[in-house]
Amino acid sequence: MVLSAEDRKLVQATWCKVAPHLDDLGGEALSRLFLCYPQTKTYFPHFNLSADSKDVHQHGLKVAKALDGAIKHLDNIRGNLAYLSDLHAYNLRVDPVNFELLAKCFHVVLAIHLGKDYSPTVILAWDKFFHCVGDVLCEKYR
Ligand code: HEM
């Protein structure tokens, strides 16, 4: 999956709009993940996963910051997220299907924050971005 110059512009511009909420975006996406796809909770047995949990909020911030790094380096997503690729494949052994589930949750969070700015072309650009992230995080499984 390759992001066009236009896709990159759209992802970066809309991320700038939601960036003031960076602290919350990841936690909101993770809460949705655990609610909508409760099987994903099995990867976090050591976390308090209740509503408004500090664990979820703090971990969500780590995920959002990783995405932030990738968005600032859209020409080198692979290099930027390489350390997470090893971690998720070899240490955490996260089943790749879960990356798609988390991406769906991020789409909903982005839609809530962006409102009308979450246009079909923006959605497509974000969809490509999450595919790229998922590809990188899964590549060590091949
Ligand atoms: C840890 C990012 C998807 C499970 C992490 C960390 C980051 C991260 C930044 C912390 C690494 C560190 O502490 O050095 C991401 C990104 C994802 C993603 C960017 C996709 C957009 C997932 C999914 C799951 C998952 C789908 C499972 C459902 C975990 C677990 C940890 C972790 C279990 C370790 C948590 C802990 O013990 O602190 N991830 N992740 N990740 N991730 Fe992911």
Image (cartoon, helix red, strand yellow):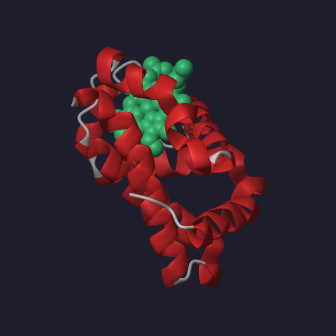
Query: In the picture, residue 76 is in which quadrant?
Result: top right
Q: Position of residue 135 (x, y in %)?
A: 35, 44
Residue at 38% x, 54% y is 131
Q: Is residue 56 above or below residue 47?
A: below
Ligand 1 sits in which quadrant? top left
- Residue 112 lies, with reference to residue 44, above or below; the image says below
Count the marks: how many?
0
Horizontal side of residue 79 vs 48, given as left or right = right
Q: Position of residue 14 (x, y in %)?
A: 67, 67
Q: Taking 33 as reference, is 38 left or right?
A: left
Q: Residue at x 70, y 44 (%)?
A: 23
Q: Nearer the viewer, residue 6 or 31?
A: 6
The quarter of the picture where the C terminus appears is top left
Q: Nearer the viewer, residue 135 or 99?
A: 135
Q: Percent position (x, y) of residue 68?
A: 65, 45
Residue 47 in view, yes or no: no
Q: Is residue 141 left or right of residue 44?
A: left
Q: Quadrant of residue 138?
A: top left
Which one is nearer the viewer's eye here, 121 or 103? 121
For the residue pair 3 and 90, the one nearer the viewer reads as 3
Residue drawn at (38%, 57%), measured in percent from left and top? Answer: 1
Residue that protrudes farthest toward the right in the picture: 20
Residue visible at 64% across and 73% down in the picture: 114
Q: In the displayed structure, would residue 135 be above or below residue 80?
A: below
> Position of 59 compared to 73: left or right?
left
- x and y percentages locating residue 83 in the rendered image: 50, 23
Q: Is residue 99 visible?
A: yes
